Amino acid sequence: MRIYRRELVNEEDVKLIATIPGVGEVAAAAILAEIGDPKRFENGKNLASWAGLAPSIHRSAGRNLTGGIKAGLQMA
């Protein structure tokens, strides 16, 4: 099944994401469909944070405290 052929996502973007080891064309199309317009993110760090892949970091009494990584997207 080639989801990206229906112009839901850009074929060039799918091919680029599919170059990541372990990510095929279907997974790449699903990732892009979930993200929507990637240009809405200022950088990769913001995208990772949105996706729940960046650990939380808090600073208290001069110490950096890191939290865990959220399991998947938190839909509101």
Image (tube, rainbow, N blue to C red):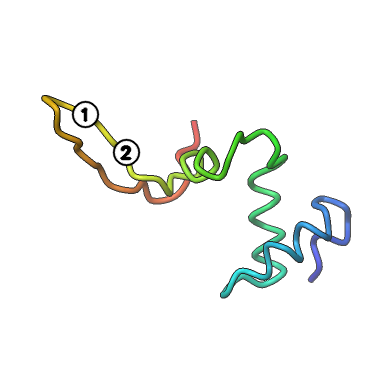
Give percent across and percent down for residue 38: 68, 42
Identify which amino acid the numbered label 1 is placed on: Arg
Q: Do the residues labelled 2 and 1 touch (CB within 8 Å)?
A: no
Quarter of the figure with the N terminus: bottom right
Q: Residue at x 68, y 68 (%)?
A: 18
Mark 2: amino acid:
Ser
Asked whether 49 or 71 is in front, the reply is 49
**Residue, far left:** 61
User: In the drawing, what numbered circle is on residue 12?
Assistant: none
Q: What element carries label 1?
A: strand
In the depicted structure, whether residue 45 falls above or below residue 17: above
Give coordinates of residue 20: x percent, y percent.
61, 69
Residue shown at the point (64%, 47%) measured from the top left: 34
Q: Indicate left or right for 6 with 70 as reference.
A: right
Return the residue nearer the eye: 48 or 60: 60
The quadrant in which residue 12 appears is bottom right
Classify mark 1: residues with Cα within 10 Å, few (<14), some (14-19) or many (20+): few
Measure how far apart labels 2 and 1 are at the Cα level. Answer: 10 Å
Q: Which residue is drawn at 21% across and 29% down?
A: 59
Q: Quadrant of residue 3?
A: bottom right
Label 2 crowd (10 A; few <14 / some 14-19 / many >=20): few
Camera-nearest label, 2 or 1: 1
Tell me how many marks there are: 2
Left or right side of 72 for 3: right
Q: Write the residue at 43% across / 49% down.
A: 53
With 54 as the anchor, is 51 left or right in this view? Answer: right
The circle on residue 56 is 2
Q: What element carries label 2?
A: loop
Residue 40: give x, y in percent of width and height: 67, 33
Q: Which residue is label 1 attached to?
A: 59
**In the picture shown, does residue 16 fall above or below 36?**
below
